[in-house]
Amino acid sequence: MRNILAVILTLFCANVFSQNTEVELIPKPQSIELKTGSFKIDKNTTIYFEPEFEIAENFLQDFLQSGAGFSLKKASEKEANIIFEKDASQPSEGYLLDISNLKISVKASDASGAFYAVQTLRQLLPPELEKSLAPKERNKSFLIPQLTITDFPKFQYRGMHLDVSRHFFDKEFVKKYIANLALLKMNKFHWHLTDDQGWRIEIKKYPELTAKGAFREETRIGHYEDKPELYDGKRYGGFYTQEDIKEVVAFAATQNVTIIPEIEMPGHAQAAISSYPELGCTGKQIPVATTWGVFEDIFCPKEETFTFLENVLSEVIPLFPGEYIHIGGDEAPKLRWKNCAHCQKLIKDKNLKDENGLQSYFIHRIEEFVNSKGKKIIGWDEILEGGLAPNATVMSWRGMQGGIDAARQKHEVIMTPVSHCYFDYYQSENLDEPVAIGGFLPLKKVYSFNPIPDELNAEEAKYILGAQANLWTEYIPTEKQVEYMVFPRALAISEVTWSGPSTNFEKDYPDFFSRVEDFMKRLDALNINYANYLYEIEGKILKVDGKIFYELTTPTKGKEIRYSINNSKVEVYSKPILIEKDSKITANVFKNGEKLGRNFSEEIKYHKGITAEISLNIPPNPAYAAGGKEALINGISGSDKRYGDKEWLGFWGDDLEITIDLGKQMEVHSIKTRFFNSPGVWIYSPKEFSISCENADGKKVSYLKNIKLEDQNKISVQVDLVENFSLKTRYIKIKVPNYGMIPDGLQGAGHKAWTFIDEIIVE
Ligand code: TNX
């Protein structure tokens, strides 16, 4: 009997595609109750959809048809095996999914909810269905685990942005990008269509915008802070016709994604001014920009310019069914306006305070026009300066403050701070990463993001609609690299915006990470070129009872770490390693004896400060404080390139004072420290700083030196060394005044600079 059963089972199983035994959904549902057993779906399965849920029906049927080779037969609400019903008690965009052995029941109050239930079903099916199965694999049955899921999004705005100006990506790729958002239950695509380096949308009334403005003569090679400046000598460009745009918009509708087009003004307008020089203050012919950064030539606020912009918007608005038009508003240097007779007269005539007032006047006028067409504007947080336009939604990018201010003024906000949402920043500390704009934003940091700042009370927090990750493409020339920068970080932003920010990071992050590992099979099937740093090693200094240890971890389960210290014999890591002198640690991750991922190595400088106490006059900015103040004396120097790692501490605008207490009088011969310098991302080493030593009573200064740092153009890192001396001291004080205001014409002009410091080495 047993044997017969086994044979029947084998026969049955042969025709059933492997079951997803573990349920590994991203984003994680609000609640999930797993049961035993499964529901079998095959070509005889019948389905009923509430007519209103057409978008969900079409998606599911297309998905099954292309992946499994069949679609489901329709049946009545009473008879169908899979039933999508309307239930007004479900939250907006939410759904209740109940899978038993004979039936799948979905309840949703709106079409979005039904659509997201389909996305969940999709993730419960084998990843192989993401591509068309080979003919002999088709028409099989598939098992879906029995469970009950209650789900809804935490935030209504769950977005991703793509800059197609700095580099152009064709409509087919844009569609793939949008389809990937739908998979992650994200619903907004911010399409950055115009900038200094290229105008990318056909405007019939102004053909030069694309005839001229969509092409640049050449493109900067390497990082834009590199010297000498090198260019590739190749003409570059492209644009979307209005037909292309319609096609992408129609596709987005099938993915439940709303597109937010961005037409930048008054800044980042060089491509437009290059096409129609009369739109600028000088009237001079300028080229489409060939390098990156912020450019002086911005739209001149004359009547002709407003007519031009209104005509442009009149063509853009009917193409996009969504409620928002993004009008930019960021990084508009005011130099041209300062020197322009028309602008100065306008400031006087309109009784405006200054050029910021003029920018605000500009945005108000455009807002009025956009509102008159039944749409709302979104602008980058600079639109707060000089007074917010009455109905504007603010995208807070330079940090959270813009969003906080806007919410307090009862304006809607989308959070997209550079610290957590800039996917053009590096994601790994590995030196072989492709060149990026700078920064360091690992998956973990994206996952730790909370779009609701602590500063806001519950009432104010309601104005935070959600969050968005941005992909600026100065350093991203290919589709493959777009995907590399977006994945897997998009999985984290999806979970933050849908499931909600983690409230128990130590528990949630490893759980998320193990789902990411599993999800990579689906990304593979979708032919997405994601970054894989699952097998990287992280090291951390621990101080226990005055002793120093080094801890090694790797984020995925079931792996072994093997390490060597100062080239000693390789050992399997089991507990933190005692460090008593300068040490170099090398390590690798292994699974079943096979080496995975890249090599890890770290140098620890066992200096006199490593066991000291440190205090700061102000805490580091929370966005750049990962290692805490101890990071400054933990023996590990921050990366030369990634100021966002856990070693560098960032301070925004404040003067910094550091006190190191060595615990007792000690003989000191040298003190070194380092500052980061990267003007493109607003980080400047100080113009000067001072080091002083004080003896045990903390009063008598036995040594004081002011150090001037001259070469502000130097890239990345300033190292300064206090020349060798010999004295006894207990306290060391380092005073680092902030660099001050960022000069005109540079990124971040008019704002205070950031100071980044790491490792104070005392020997
Ligand atoms: C700032 S974010 C910009 C963009 C750049 C980006 C690079 C924003 C509103 N403006 O023009 O591409 O930094 O990270």
Image (spheres, grey):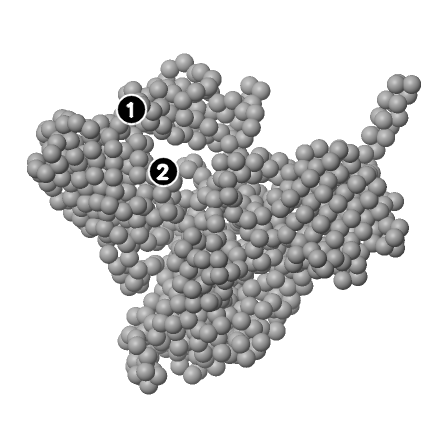
Name the residue beneath numbered marker 1: 546
Quarter where residue 267 is shown: bottom left
The label number, if any, that marks residue 627 in the structure image: 2
Q: In which quarter of the image is the N terminus?
A: top right
Quarter where residue 349 is shown: bottom left
- Side (left or right) of 733 relative to 548: left
Q: Residue at point 60% right, 67% down?
A: 322
Residue 353 location, x and y as percent?
Answer: 30, 77
Q: Which amino acid does label 2 sit on?
A: Gly
The reply to whether dot 2 and dot 1 touch (C-beta < 8 Å) is no
Residue 403 location, x and y as percent?
Answer: 43, 60
Q: Is mark 1 within 8 Å of ligand 1?
A: no
In this view, the mark in front (2 or 1): 1
| Label 1 residue SS | loop
Residue 48 location, x and y as percent?
Answer: 83, 54
Q: What residue type is labelled 1?
A: Gly
Q: Residue at point 61% right, 65% down?
A: 245
Q: In which quarter of the image is the C terminus?
A: top left
Q: Residue at point 10% right, 29% down?
A: 727
433 or 23: nearer the eye?
23
Residue 456 location, x and y as percent?
Answer: 43, 57
Circle 1 residues within 10 Å: few <14, some 14–19, many ≥20: few
388 or 527: nearer the eye?
388
Q: Distance between the residues labelled 2 and 1?
A: 18 Å
Q: Residue at point 33% right, 59% down?
A: 748
- Side (left or right) of 378 relative to 621: right
- Residue 473 to residue 697: above or below: below
Q: Which numbered disc, 2 or 1, marks the residue that appears first in the sequence?
A: 1
